[in-house]
Amino acid sequence: MPDLTTPPFPPAFLWGAATSAYQIEGAVREGGRTPSIWDTFSHTPGRTAGGDHADVTVDHYHRYRDDVALMADLGLTAYRFSVSWPRVQPTGRGPAVQVGLDFYRRLVDELLAHGIKPALTLYHWDLPQELEDAGGWPERDTAYRFAEYAQIMGEALGDRVEQWTTLNEPWCSAFLGYGSGVHAPGRTDAGASLRAAHHLNLAHGLATSALRSAIPARDSIAVSLNSSVVRPASLSPADMAAARKIDDLANGVFHGPMLHGSYPQSLFEATRSVTDWSYVQDGDLTLIHQPLDALGLNYYTPTLVEATETAPAGSPRSDGHGLSAYSPWPGADDVAFLQTPGERTEMGWTIDPTGLHELIMRYTREAPGLPLYVTENGAAYDDKPDPEGNVHDPERIAYLHGHLSAVRRAIADGADVRGYYLWSLMDNFEWAYGYGKRFGLVHVDYETQVRTIKGSGRRYADIIRDHRSRARRAA
Ligand code: FCB
């Protein structure tokens, strides 16, 4: 068994697992919660595999105490979860619903009682449906609504939650939600996807300011980006240009304004046929460019691209995953997406830990001095209990070893990585793929809600235990 703790991770390194509200909570009609765009989308025929939705999912809303006990069994020192916006502010505006706030307060208190640090994400894709009906993320007002919600949460939980994240993967919200339409709300309008991206940026900036005024100064504010590791298929100028274009559309469009206070000029040029960016108002970039305390990186697989003939105007190009006829890459009809060679997970995503190292090193350069967290990383496999009820998942153990080694290597190369959150604590509703893809350290029988720690969960617990005893000895 590879020794993953030599050289050791920093003593205060956080060992976590991640989930999100819509994927695990269920109880979609309790406590005054109203539908989010994901409730509407998953109940629309043809949108998710098998028509799956998360009305019940793994029933975490009622079983959160048992789930925190599982986290404690695993030895987790941190837990990343998200708040369901329509559970605390059902219409997306106005006063909060106490029942909703109370649920998160109870969850946080339970975590703290077990010595597990809560890391709270404000938005993991479940926009209140009423705000989508008013225009959704392409509308500027949604950003202001989000800041109001951030303030409510900061005031309610700032005393006990020290790690705050504004948005999870705004790329998915903008480009899968409004471009390729494979995520809620399922719109396929390239111009709207770029407007959404800008207003998500604005939402992040406004929410960061609102949180600062509501939470203690010691608390940390971050954003979690699923920045792509974009690799050109060759060193030809055309392929290199294709990779730069996708880097702008995947990464620069968010980290540009958030970390540097500007959009890449090349992004404006690449998307000229789709949008004129006139919705970027004077002062917006200052509002977006707020000092942050950390940056979250979500990594699964690298992106391999090459230059190709431009598709004839108006002919939609596929999203590259076979889920939609529409591309999530506005202005990039001259770029083709290739399958990176190598072994793949059940998602069809190539396993390549070198990409995680590359990503961490890139943001070490992009955001010098900013502590980094891997806020998601993980693999789906078709896990099934054996006749004795044990779940063996050696592939996930290998995946975990490979990626933790990459993190350790990045730290040795000078990166300031403070923690790692495996996706996911337990099997759950995997968006458009429904329940067919299992990412958990814990297996869930969806009929009985029985939870079983998988082999990978046991291995992760061993790694954490080794680390903690080494850190104690060193102290
Ligand atoms: C990420 C999402 C997370 C989960 C993983 C597999 O993009 O943030 O909710 O679906 O992918």
Image: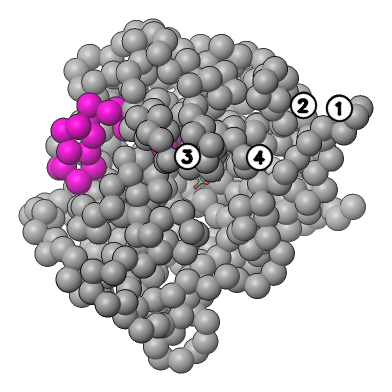
At label 4, the amino acid type is: Arg
Residue tagged 1: 389
At label 2, the amino acid type is: Thr
Residue tagged 2: 452
- Whether ligand 1 has any atom under 8 Å from the Cβ at mark 2 is answered as no
Q: Position of residue 177 (x, y in %)?
A: 34, 47
Q: Earlier in the sequence, mark 1 or mark 3?
A: 3
Up/down of 357 relative to 304, above or below: above
Q: Mark 4 or mark 3: which is in front?
A: 3
Callout 4: SS = loop
Tell me how far mark 1 sits from mark 4, CA to CA: 17 Å
Residue located at (32% from left, 18% from top): 34
Residue located at (47% from left, 15% from top): 27
Q: Mark 1 or mark 3: which is in front?
A: 3
**Pick the front one: 25 or 41:** 41
Asked if disc 2 and disc 1 are in contact, CB closer than 8 Å, the reply is yes
Residue range (magenta): 118-140
Asked if residue 129 is among those painted magenta in the image, a careful observer would answer yes
Residue tagged 4: 438
Answer few, some or many: residues within 10 Å of disc 3's Cα (few below 14, many 20 plus, some between 14 and 19): many
Quadrant in the picture for residue 211: top left
235 vs 280, left or right, is: right
Answer few, some or many: residues within 10 Å of disc 4's Cα (few below 14, many 20 plus, some between 14 and 19): many
Tell me how far mark 4 sits from mark 3, CA to CA: 15 Å
Q: Earlier in the sequence, mark 1 or mark 4?
A: 1
Q: Mark 2 or mark 4: which is in front?
A: 4
**Pick the front one: 377 or 310:** 310
Query: Which residue appears farthest toward the front when viewing the image?
Result: 45
Q: Earlier in the sequence, mark 4 or mark 3?
A: 3
Residue tagged 3: 48
